[in-house]
Image (spheres, helix red, strand yellow):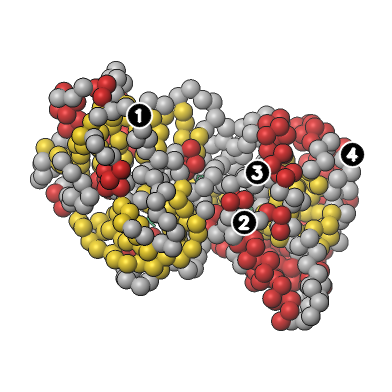
Amino acid sequence: MNEIDLSVNIGSLKLKNPVMLASGTVGYGNEISEFTDLSKIGAIVTKSISLKPRKGNPPQRITETPSGMLNAIGLANVGVEEFITHKIPFLKKINSTLICNIAASSIEEYIECVEILETQETIKGFEINVSCPNVKEGGLIFGNDINAVGRITEKVRAKTNKPIIIKLSPNNSNISDYAEVVKKEGGDAVSAINTLVGTAFDIYSRKPKIKNITGGLSGPAIKPVALAKVLEISRKVDIPIIGIGGIFDWKDAVEFMIVGASAFQIGTVNFVNPRASLEIIEGLKKYCEETSITKISDLIASRII
Amino acid sequence: MFIDDCVVASNTKIAENTFLIGLEVPFSTEKLLPGQFFNIKVSNNSFPLLRRPFSISDVIENRIYFMYKVVGEGTSIISKKVKGETLNLLGPLGNSFNIDDSFSTAIIIGGGIGIAPFPFLIKKLVNKNIQVLFGMRSKSEAHNYGLVNINYSSDDGSIGLHGNVIDLLDVELKNSDETKTKIFACGPNAMFRALQKYLTNKNVLCEASMESAMACGFGICQGCPIEFKNNPSYNLICKDGPVFNIKDIVI
Ligand SMILES: Cc1cc2nc3c(=O)[nH]c(=O)nc-3n(C[C@H](O)[C@H](O)[C@H](O)COP(=O)(O)OP(=O)(O)OC[C@H]3O[C@@H](n4cnc5c(N)ncnc54)[C@H](O)[C@@H]3O)c2cc1C
Ligand SMILES: Cc1cc2nc3c(=O)[nH]c(=O)nc-3n(C[C@H](O)[C@H](O)[C@H](O)COP(=O)(O)O)c2cc1C
Ligand code: FES
């Protein structure tokens, strides 16, 4: 049998396979490269970067919940300057497709970040995080404001010809309206979903388990929600979707593609099994062989309802 | 970096709620360092979802031993593992105790299950005077696995000194030359806070092995921050630690 074509397109961005590593779950790539060959992976999305370094939230930042985890890292990151001087050189060497995720507290900050990073050849696209639930300014305030999402897309579009992916929040009712605005303002794709707002309390101390009180829920627990959001967007808006949420193995990944995702990102699973990305690629190949699929892109939105 | 299933060789109770599990590993254990830890997946499914970190407690040939206390779901599952079953190990992770600086006496302080990393450290401390101070709530937690020259203290007075390890340390330091002594400590944060305060005006080296909730254990989730006194950004317990100079950290 001929080699299976695993490549997919997200707007003008061509990926060798649909497996992407989700922002905030692989840092800037160096640690996870001890476990996995990053050059084999479709794309790596770096930890949300902001104009200036961010210290992040005080501990405790994470806690486990049934089939998931809550995190309130608070966008701890090295800032744009340090990212360019110390992180990009490594990312360049590993020969994977680099998507740079940006978080900001104002529309101006998004624009400034894109302006600075735009000239970096290693960066093949931007993912704009308008949906972090764990910071006071920016984050969800933008994610829940459809006009702000539209303006951010428009302004960022004006500054770069690289593919722009807007990462949407599940913490609102009509995610497809947001996807529609992204499309209208010239965004290339949307990624869905970021984490869901959640909390957990200790019943003896009666205190929240994480210092920030609320955090973002990720992991297998959110997969059905994420799938429903991808389905909603796919039914209503003609825009490439990157599916995210609770993917732990190749079966989860196939499910996302069938429902409507052109590619997908894996997050929490990297903490538990840093080799999951490669295992998923192998699983996808086997699935294609078994089901006589020659191009994985044939799976996208192939749902039968 | 190693990540794979390892076969349980033994799993025995050594004190109340406290067990020692031995796992056969397929790699050379020669390079393992005291203070390092492994992140262990206790099930093949998503319950519990995350790995659980455990310090290397002892190494015998190609077996690694972990000493653990049953405190929740994960440790409860481990306590039921029998010979021949497997656990998935990821590691070794983290830095280690530094045993190369000049000291002739090592004072080892373990608060409760915080004693876990020390049998392995003691094996590596050759030609040193070793004094172990083992504090606990009550006698039921006491054991002597891999320890030497033990002084116990207990909150309820049921074993050793009626008091805490800081009281034991106070007595111990009075009899030693501070400049030739190094303290190695592991235990709950309340113990570390008391220890840090006690050592403020003393000139004795002290390394502390710190704990935190962890998701990954190798630096990618940013879940395990620890504040340094003179540094605006956080360090990570899993990657920069878990062993720190007690004078550097904010507890
Ligand atoms: C570097 C390191 C080394 C350790 N070495 C040992 C050891 O040798 N022996 C031993 O018995 N225990 C050790 N621990 C603690 C051990 O990891 C926890 O007791 C264990 O994770 C509890 O799991 P559980 O599912 O039984 O408990 P549960 O209460 O059901 O779950 C514990 C959950 O809470 C998180 N958590 C929250 N706060 C903490 C905290 N302060 N410390 C650890 N986990 C926390 C865990 O990550 C986990 O997700 C170590 C911890 C660290 C960080
Ligand atoms: C610890 C942690 C940190 C994260 N940090 C970011 C971030 O900086 N930027 C971002 O856009 N998403 C961040 N996310 C969200 C993930 O990229 C992803 O959208 C989410 O975890 C759902 O996928 P999963 O269930 O596969 O983890 C973070 C998630 C986790 C668990
Ligand atoms: S536990 Fe993930 S960074 Fe330390």
Is the CB of mark 4 within 8 Å of ligand 2?
no
Which residue, given by chain and number where applicable, does mark 3 sit on?
Answer: A28
Q: Any mark on residue A36, and which? A: 2
Q: Is residue A232 visible?
A: no
Which residue, given by chain and number where applicable, does mark 4 sit on?
Answer: A158
- Tag 4: residue type? Ala
- Tag 2: residue type? Thr
Q: Is residue B230 visible?
A: yes
In terms of depth relative to the viewer, which is nearer, A260 or B127? B127
* Alpha carbon distance from label 1 to label 2: 36 Å
Q: Relative to B167, is A161 above or below?
A: below
Residue at position x 52%, y 58% in the image: A272
- Mark 1 crowdedness (10 Å alpha carbons): few <14, some 14-19, many ≥20: few
- Mark 3 crowdedness (10 Å alpha carbons): few <14, some 14-19, many ≥20: many
Residue at position x 43%, y 53% in the image: B38
Q: Where is residue A88 in the image (x, y as percent from the top left)?
A: 72, 39
Which residue, given by chain and number where applicable, does mark 1 sit on?
Answer: B101
Q: Quadrant of residue B159?
A: top left
